[in-house]
Image (cartoon, grey):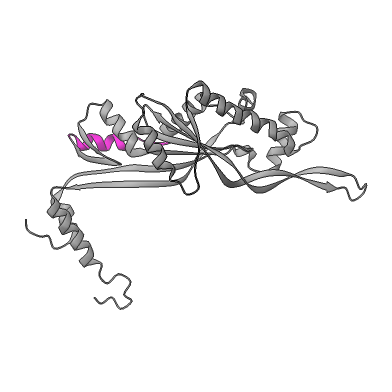
Amino acid sequence: MTIARSAADVLASHVTLEVECIDRMYLNVYQSRLQHVEGVVSFLRNHRGHPIASSALLEPISQRFVAGLYRFAADHNVAVIDFAKGQRKDDVAHEFLAEFDQPEGVLFIGRAQEKTAVFRTEKRRNAATGATYPWIVRSTAMVNHFYIYAVDADFGPFFIKFCSYFPYTAKLCVNGNEWAKRQAATAGIGFEALDNGFATCDDPARLQRICDRLDAARIDRLLRKWLARLPHPFTAADRRAGYRYDISVLQAEFSLTQMLDRPASGRAFFESVIRENLDVGDPTGSR
């Protein structure tokens, strides 16, 4: 093989498969009306009908939600585990995934204590009368979070992390490459999979069109589908009143997979990248 003079030459001449796809997406799942004190007060007084707004009224909601998670686990024979400090949650998920043989379902539920924003009640005193009254304020606390690791027929492995305290903000994590693998298999496109991507593909152009179809609407449908199946912290009446989850992007990663034709091409590419970047960080620009 003739050694190319630049990394660009290697990519131009020796790439056999190139696929660009959304990779990992980490999304906020939140109640937009309950992100500020005024919204919480309105929820308790105007919606739930309590004469006084106090964070003590939120505890029964949390207890019902957590009990629902444990009941769901018992009813579906799903393990509930406590994550150890420093333990890689994805490693645990891979162990459960290796034993999972269903088209979709919950793998396990993991519990971990994490710091998060919460609402608390302070006692304040009326300057004129001296009487005390409750006042809701924002604060932070270490509270239990429940990681629901699952497999979806369209998206493959994903997880939803729920905070067990009001307003029960959650996170959704999906992998676009896993979604694309499932769509390619359904479409009958032959491919060889990598752990997180594609090594070969019989129809790269068609695969790229599949990757381009992953959009906000499909991710939103995934969330709604599983919110309907899992225990929900808010009642049906709450949701009818507009207390539904919104979704936004917290972190997005994008992948460009480029497979080379032979190991020697990979070595040439690596050596070219090193050679072309020897002066990176040198203020004089000299090598």
Task: Indicate whether 46 appears above or below 272.
Answer: above
Point out the image quarter for the C terminus. bottom left
Q: Residue furthest right?
A: 129
Q: Position of residue 60 (x, y in %)?
A: 69, 30
The verdict on residue 98 being magenta is no
Instruction: Based on the picture, tell me whether residue 204 belongs to the magenta stretch.
Output: yes
Left/right placement of residue 144 relative to residue 134 reads left
Residue 219 lies left or right of residue 239; in this view the side is left
Q: Residue at x 28, y 41 (%)?
A: 197
The answer to which quarter of the image holds residue 209 is top left
Which residue: 35% across, 42% down?
22
Q: Main secondary structure of the magenta part?
A: helix
- Quick one: which residue is furthest to the left in this view? 1
Q: Nearer the viewer, residue 255 or 104?
A: 104
Location of residue 43 (image quadrant): top right
| Badge count | 0
Residue drawn at point x = 39 percent, y = 42 percent: 91
Which quarter of the rendered picture does the N terminus lie within?
bottom left
Q: Position of residue 132 (x, y in %)?
A: 86, 44
**Residues shaded magenta:** 202-216
Give x and y (percent) for residue 192: 21, 36
Residue 269 at what x, y percent from top left?
18, 58
Horizontal side, residue 14 vs residue 35: left or right: left
Which quadrant of the structure image shows residue 21? top left
